[in-house]
Image (tube, grey):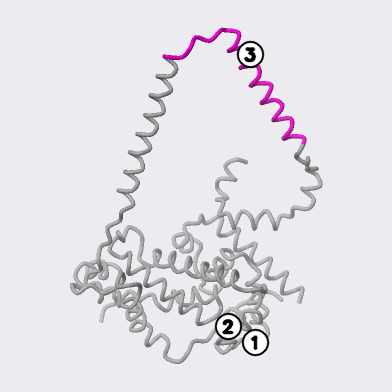
């Protein structure tokens, strides 16, 4: 069966009788009754302007964050200046040990990962799935075209 | 009597918000209802989502700058309300709600407000299989006959992506219908 105008013209959805006639009154009433007067009609007829605290909270968080970072940096610098002199050998040893540890950790992680056979994966992923993913994630096709 | 425009509403909102908002509901209530209804299918759910749309719009109308059209703004709110409702419904249901029968079974109104023939039932079942956003795109193009440019203005999605989405939706639906 193909999509055609016949199917399009037939709207199978119905509404209760008079639904749209009373929609405005019903909606205004719902607005008046919504949430503890927050949505209540102001007497002046103007909707109440809500003062958002978000900017103030964001500013407070930024100031606290800056103060914290400053404190940490000052402490680190102070410690560095007062630090016991390291022997050059100790520094080098620590650096090498850290590198070895990183290498070991990477190798351990890699050995745990099941390597996927890409050709098999390609066979099971259909165009439909890819397109659905793109649509769902709202990935702009223009961005993809630019890469091609 | 001349037709009310969004410019009229913009002027009135500063002096008599309630009157202006009534005009908004009169202008766009029906259009938004059908947009929501085709997504959520059930009348009571559509009514709830529509009420929530206008309640949210009322709460935020004071900060709306009229840089985009009112309809675009309301369309965005109503789409979010409809999709939120679908997700909530699916979370609360123990069965899959991807066909009309399942939806009507869980709705207090049943199928009272659905009067479609066999072809309509098949089509709606096919549409219900689409991902939510693709469903909305298909409805806007097929039932509302919107241009891609209009849809792009309303949804913020590029024309190219909308064309691809609609084309793909049509193919899926036709495959579903042929499979019946």
Residue ID at (35%, 40%): A62
B104 and B160: which is toward the camera: B104
In contact (CB < 8 Å): disc 3 and disc 1 = no
Query: Is residue A101 highlighted in magenta?
Result: yes
Give the mark nearest the N terminus, 1 or 2.
Answer: 2
Residue under numbered circle 3: A93
Residue under numbered circle 2: B107
Which chain does the numbered disc 1 sit on?
B
Q: Is residue B56 left or right of residue A6?
A: left
A83 and A23: which is toward the camera: A83
Residue ID at (19%, 74%): A43
Q: Position of residue B44 (x, y in %)?
A: 50, 82
Labels 3 and 1 within one chain: no
Query: Is residue B173 highlighted in magenta?
Result: no
Q: Position of residue A72 (x, y in %)?
A: 41, 28
The magenta segment is A82-111
Q: Quadrant of the C terminus of chain A?
A: top right
**Which secondary structure lies at badge 1?**
loop
Which chain does the numbered disc 2 sit on?
B
Q: Residues within 10 Å of mark 2 (few under 14, many from 20)?
A: some
**Which secondary structure lies at badge 3?**
helix
Q: Residues within 10 Å of mark 3 (few under 14, many from 20)?
A: few
Above or below for A68 versus A56:
above
Q: Position of residue A61 (x, y in %)?
A: 36, 43
């Amino acid at each position: 069966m193909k999509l055609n105008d016949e199917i399009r013209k037939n709207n199978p959805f119905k509404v209760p009788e008079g639904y749209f006639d009373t929609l405005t009154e019903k909606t205004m009433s719902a607005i008046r009754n919504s949430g503890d007067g927050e949505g209540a009609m102001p007497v002046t007829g103007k909707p109440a302007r809500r003062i958002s605290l978000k900017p103030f909270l964001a500013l407070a968080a930024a100031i606290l964050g800056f103060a914290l970072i400053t404190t940490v940096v000052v402490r680190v610098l102070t410690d560095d200046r007062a630090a016991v002199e390291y022997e050059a050998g100790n520094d080098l040893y620590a650096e090498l040990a850290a590198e070895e540890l990183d290498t070991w950790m990477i190798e351990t992680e890699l050995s745990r990962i099941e390597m996927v056979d890409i050709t098999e994966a390609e066979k099971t992923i259909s165009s439909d799935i890819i397109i659905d993913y793109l649509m769902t994630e709202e990935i702009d096709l223009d961005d993809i075209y630019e890469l091609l | 009597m001349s037709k009310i425009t969004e410019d009229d509403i913009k002027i009135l909102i500063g002096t008599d918000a309630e009157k202006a908002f009534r005009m908004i509901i009169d202008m766009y209530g029906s259009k938004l209802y059908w947009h929501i209804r085709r997504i959520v299918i059930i009348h009571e759910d559509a009514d709830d989502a529509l009420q929530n749309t206008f309640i949210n719009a009322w709460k935020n109308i004071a900060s709306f700058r009229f840089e985009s059209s009112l309809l675009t703004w309301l369309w965005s709110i109503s789409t979010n309300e409809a999709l939120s409702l679908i997700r909530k419904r699916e979370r609360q249901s123990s069965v899959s709600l991807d066909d009309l029968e399942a939806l009507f079974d869980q709705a207090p109104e049943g199928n009272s407000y659905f009067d479609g023939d066999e072809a309509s039932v098949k089509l709606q079942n096919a549409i219900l299989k689409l991902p939510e956003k693709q469903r909305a795109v298909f409805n806007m193009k097929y039932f509302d006959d919107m241009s891609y440019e209009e849809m792009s203005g309303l949804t913020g999605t590029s024309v190219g992506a909308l064309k691809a989405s609609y084309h793909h939706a049509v193919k899926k639906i036709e495959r579903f219908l042929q499979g019946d």
